[in-house]
Image (cartoon, grey):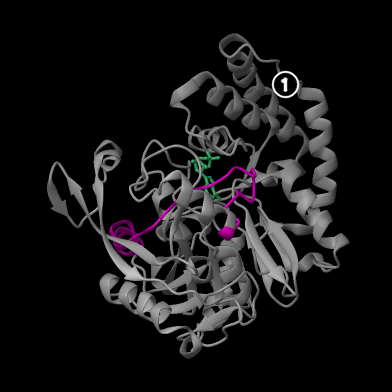
Amino acid sequence: MPGIIVVGAQWGDEGKGKVVDVFSANADLVVRYQGGANAGHTLVVNGVKTVLHLIPSGVLHPKCMCMIAPGVVLDVEEVIKEIRDLKAAGVLTNPEQLRISDQCTVLLSYHRKLDAARETAAGNEKIGTTGKGIGPAYEDRAARKAVLFGDLFDRERLKQKLESSLKEKNFMLTKYYGEEAVDAEPLYARLLELATELEPYRSKDTSLVIHKALKAGKKVLFEGAQGTMLDLLHGTYPFVTSSSTISGSACIGTGIGPGMMQKIIGITKAYTTRVGSGPFPTEMNAELSERLRTEGGEFGATTGRPRRCGWLDLVALKYAIRVNGLTSLALMKLDVLSGHEKIDVCTAYKLDGVEIKDLPVNSHDLERVEPVYRSLAGWNEDLQQVRTIQDLPQAARDFVQFVATEIATPIDVVSVGPGREQTLWIKPLFA
Ligand code: IMP
């Protein structure tokens, strides 16, 4: 069963989009299974940049079918914009290339409004969300009040669901947050318009399609969004997103059993970044952070916010290997580390003076840990032109080897730039 899960092993923004795009050259189907337009997956092909928020990163390969599975919260305004932009760029010319599950939760304007109102009200305690309405949309799903994508095609049901949902939402918005109410009529009319435009992409049962593809031996990639440390249950709660970001979510979000998965590939940068609030043990001082942010272009693809930067954290990475059951890793953005005299790698933490090797799962403890670093020699060469592992400078190879040995998990891929050609294979994906 060639099901392969690609999952972020850090706090998101690891480069999953590039990896999925490169892997998609040999895949039949790519499936997004959780999160929403809070994700920003950047692909660079022949110097042209495409940023995707909801549509799977296989879309630039015309023969690769793309699917948005029930676990995704679907911002219908965002997805239509993405579809139009792709079509304008000559991509997604065949509507059959994209399938959106009828079971997806529809994310609406009131979710975005509630997200923003809550963050403002939280002041210093805010999570630093992307403001895309992700939390409120997942809440609706859990409360069994969500509008589903399939509801857009049933006028009566849609109307009734919107009215019932807005009663509660408008009470919260106006009476609790002092915001303006959302008017049901224009929202309903807009959703009917969008339904017409989105109908060609509709799928009644994506699980069935994926299941059949896997049974037929087709190669299916499951594309994660965000990263392990932002997982609702296993991340740095409460500074997390509202979905499960770990590999198990690929099964839950799609309705495919774990037995159909063959590999689980974790994506990590050669250093660490985080956007938003919350513990970050290896965060660098302002000067180093600024340097890495500039050299690595570390600004949010969705919000443009500057990312916080830090050294590679092997304690957190080993945790990601454990909770995801990673079978191998892709190590991204190695080129960004060029020009540092020494490169620090965190191999343990100290908590209350005691050295620990396992990540404390409680955020309050994680906030207090001090990283224990191993300093490795840096290199000055520009890695962006390197095309094979053997051609990397010795110090860069030693860095990769050190990481692989410490985490006792193979590294299959090393990336030295945003382009497809800047991908160094240690082991081919579909070997
Ligand atoms: P939300 O997902 O918008 O609710 O944001 C919750 C937390 O997850 C915030 O710290 C965000 O910065 C973070 N987050 C959400 N999506 C991403 C992503 O795609 N990359 C990095 N961080 C993200």
Dividing the picture into quarters, in which one does residue 312 lie? bottom left
Figure disc tally: 1
Does any portion of residue 260 appear in the rendered image?
A: no
- The residues colored magenta run 295-324
Nearer to us in this view, 114 or 328: 328
- Residue 277 image point, x, y percent: 45, 37
Q: Amino acid at mark 1?
A: Val
Q: Left of 279 or right of it: where is 366?
A: left
Q: Residue at x 72, y 75 (%)?
A: 61
Reply yes or no: does residue 197 show up in magenta. no
Does any portion of residue 21 appear in the rendered image?
A: yes
- Residue 67 image point, x, y percent: 64, 62
- Residue 20 image point, x, y percent: 58, 70
From the viewer's perspective, is residue 103 above or below residue 220? Answer: above
Q: Which residue is mark 1?
A: 182
Q: Left of 378 or right of it: where is 376?
A: left
